Image (tube, helix red, strand yellow):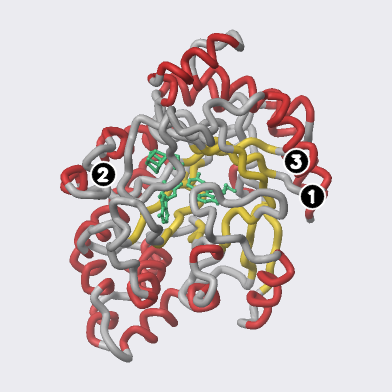
Amino acid sequence: MKILSDISNSQIKEGNLSKEDILNLLNTKQNDITDLMSLANSKRENNIITYSKNVFIPLTEICINYCGYCTFRKDPTDSKAIILKEKSEVISQLKIAEKQGCKEALLTFGEQADEEEVVKLALNKMGFENMTEYSYDICEATLNNTNLLPHTNAGVLSYDEMKSLKEVNVSMGMMLENSSSRLRKTDAHKNSPGKDPKLRVKTIADAGKLKIPYTTGILVGIGETKEEIAESLLSIKNLQDKYGHIQEIIIQNFRSKPGIPMEYYAEPSVLDMIRTVSVAKLLFEDVSIQVPPNLNHETNQIFLLCGADDWGGISPVSKDYVNPEAPWPEIEHMKHLTNYVGLDLKERLAIYDKYINNEYLNENILNRTIKLKKSIS
Ligand SMILES: O=c1nc2n(C[C@H](O)[C@H](O)[C@H](O)CO)c3cc(O)ccc3cc-2c(=O)[nH]1
Ligand SMILES: C[C@H]1O[C@@H](n2cnc3c(N)ncnc32)[C@H](O)[C@@H]1O
Ligand code: SF4
């Protein structure tokens, strides 16, 4: 194949691809696609596909952004909105999750929710100044009351906020979504100041400086060009080369939902997803490539054939609040799908093995993580 053979083996081995190389690969056509897939798949280090057994805790559904693809965010006037989930409720959900074998408490919520009066009041009533103080308290309570390990995905945070949350999280994350500031003028991000790529790159870089094991990724199909996908992957690569804290990259496909501003946007085709997953695998060394199984019910297995090696969080006890219409497959079913392509399914923690050390974790969390790790291996 012409395009692939132009790229040398050592370039692929080192993930040393230029923007032009990536763009060519993202435009791969016809039979060359199977070559691209095989090449990406041949970079697989082993036959293991991982997942994390988690419980999804949306601390608040209030958010200052209005992303054109989002149904998670609720208006403060919505009587069904979670303004602030109470600590006692969180703990009881965590205990149920623990009984079901969950090891990760995934705290995902709206950005800068404390700028909204109702949230601010609810926080003050409980004795907290802001969402970060409350998140800290919830993570600490998670560690004190269960053996679950917190992973917070709260969008853009400051250096000091992350410095504080690092004490009580094994890992954190935030999708870059895309590095293009052009999207700030489009349906996807025109009402979302928090989706300014500069702020997001800074958040990911700060996490790197703080040595926080980190999850990021791109949202495919939000009106971006292939060139912007190439630039986004390179911008994550840049951060990884500098700090080395990125444990996994999520290649997430946009799913259309009734009522969102982007309802009539086309979802990415399976071929575009295949090309993007393949390129991500070729570009990165020792970083997991995650494709969420609940967003690709019919097409999951194909991503295992082009280098994906992680299914992400799968929950036996909670829904995916971001994509509530997309139930997670049963873990048994995921095992079957994985085995069927000749690979093995294995549970992992919210922190990948190479970060389980005192460079990334304080002594308390490190000891607990090591203990929990023993229980799954
Ligand atoms: O169920 C979900 N889990 C999401 N997760 C959870 C993720 O799959 C796991 O928590 C991590 O793999 C850590 O184990 C995210 C975590 C991040 O740090 C950043 C973004 C996401 C996005 C989602 C998501 O859309 N749905
Ligand atoms: C938690 C992450 O979920 C993703 N997200 C938000 N809305 C959608 C959607 N309609 N389809 C797929 N992913 C979505 C964003 O990338 C966000 O950062
Ligand atoms: S995707 Fe996150 S930042 Fe965007 S509106 Fe939804 S909750 Fe807010």
Question: Residue beneath label 2, please?
Answer: 189
Q: Residue at x 16, y 47 (%)?
A: 182
Please indicate whether residue 210 sits to the left or right of residue 142 in the image: left
Q: Nearer the viewer, mark 3 or mark 2?
A: 2
Please indicate whether residue 256 sits to the left or right of residue 196 in the image: right
Return the residue nearer the eye: 160 or 260: 260
Return the residue nearer the eye: 336 or 187: 187
Figure check: 32 above or below 196:
below
SS of the residue under disc 3: helix
SS of the residue under disc 1: loop
Under mark 2, the amino acid is: His
Question: Residue beneath label 3, please?
Answer: 370
Q: Earlier in the sequence, mark 1 or mark 2?
A: 1
How far, Cα to Cα, is label 1 from label 2? 37 Å
**Image quarter of the C terminus:** bottom right
Please indicate whether residue 241 sits to the left or right of residue 55 in the image: left
Q: Position of residue 173 (x, y in %)?
A: 48, 41
Q: Nearer the viewer, mark 1 or mark 3?
A: 1
Q: Is residue 209 visible?
A: no
Q: Which mark is residue 101?
A: 1
